[in-house]
Image (cartoon, rainbow, N blue to C red):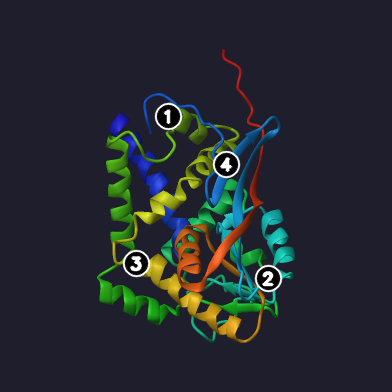
Amino acid sequence: MYRVLSVMKLQIITALGVGLALPLIAADKPQAKPETEAGYIRFREHPKGAVMEVAVIQMKNAKTGAQVDLIGAVHIGDKAYYEELNKIFKGYDRVLYEMVKPKEMDPAKPRDPKRKQSGISTLQNFMGEKLGLEFQLDIVNYGAKNFVHADMTPKQFAKRQKARGENMLSIMFKSFQQEMAAKKKGGGAAQVSTAELLRALFSPNFAVDMKYIFAQQFQDMERISAGMDTDEGSVILTERNDVALKVLKKELASGHKKLGIFYGAAHLPDMKEKLIKDFGYQQTGTKWVTAWDLPKRTVRKKR
């Protein structure tokens, strides 16, 4: 039983990391959970509850004066989170967004409930429903005039994965293996005790308790997602980033001076590195947007 629960915990961690990065298509004893200043996602507890926040990394080119903000995203969140993003997006000349979709598909149109969803989309919708969260595609205004598609088409994505011998199962398995190896060395994502997981699974406040567990794992997402890449990169992260940055070059050449790149937070470390190395940008600041606003957990009285 213990081994089954341990594997379950690792699967949750891996699924979260992979789910964040994929395109829109525990220890025996609990450990202390200090406030962590993660680079792109952070979890903070306060007297009235907790928040999971996502970074907006502000980058500027000293020579041209152009500003490019890396706007991190999680694909399920509070409705207020996506509404706040819609307000933020209005301040940019162009917002380059991620979505592996056919060129002719209009993401602003309501989703067809009869359309077959990918496994990841099904997972994200399931999590959103069970945790009382919204799905990104349902709230973000993809019909905004300043929105520009900056991602692969499904055909391009499949072609590149085939060329690399890469698929979703192999990516998840590799990430899972690396997380297991990190655990053996005393590292890995924040520990979740077996008792804590069971308590959340059978709690009358299931959604709140599970969100606390998930939020603490999300802040380890950068490291887990990095495990998907080989030394030569991957289609799922680095190659899609390269597509986005090609679109960025085009938009900068058109004279736009303030741009945002709206991509899953797992993509931001590689994007930031390339903006510095290949584009001559430097980070000038970081803002945080609350993706999950969590109420204080109810402590059950012992009988």
Q: CA distance from mark 3 to mark 1?
A: 33 Å
Q: Identify the residue position indicated by label 2 in the image.
A: 141
Instruction: Answer whether residue 212 is visible to the viewer in this image.
Output: yes
- Within-10-Å neighbours for mark 3: few <14, some 14–19, many 20+: some
Q: CA distance from mark 4 to mark 1?
A: 18 Å
**Sequence-first disc among 3 and 2:** 2
Q: Identify the residue position indicated by label 3 in the image.
A: 234
Tell me the quarter of the image containing the C terminus: top right
**Sequence-first disc among 1 and 2:** 2
Q: CA distance from mark 4 to mark 3?
A: 28 Å
Q: Amino acid at mark 2?
A: Asn
**Sequence-first disc among 4 and 3:** 4
- The answer to whether the residue labelled 3 contacts the one labelled 2, judged by CB atoms less than 8 Å apart, is no
Q: Identify the residue position indicated by label 1 in the image.
A: 193
Instruction: Give how far across and how far down residue 148 sits, in percent.
Output: 60, 79
Q: What element does badge 2 sit on?
A: loop
Instruction: Answer whether residue 25 is visible to the viewer in this image.
Output: no
Nearer the camera: disc 4 or disc 1: 4
Q: CA distance from mark 3 to mark 2?
A: 29 Å
The residue depicted at 46 percent of the width and 50 percent of the height is 221
Nearer the camera: disc 3 or disc 2: 3
- The answer to whether the residue labelled 4 contacts the one labelled 3, judged by CB atoms less than 8 Å apart, is no
Instruction: Give how far across and how far down residue 256 sits, in percent.
Output: 66, 80
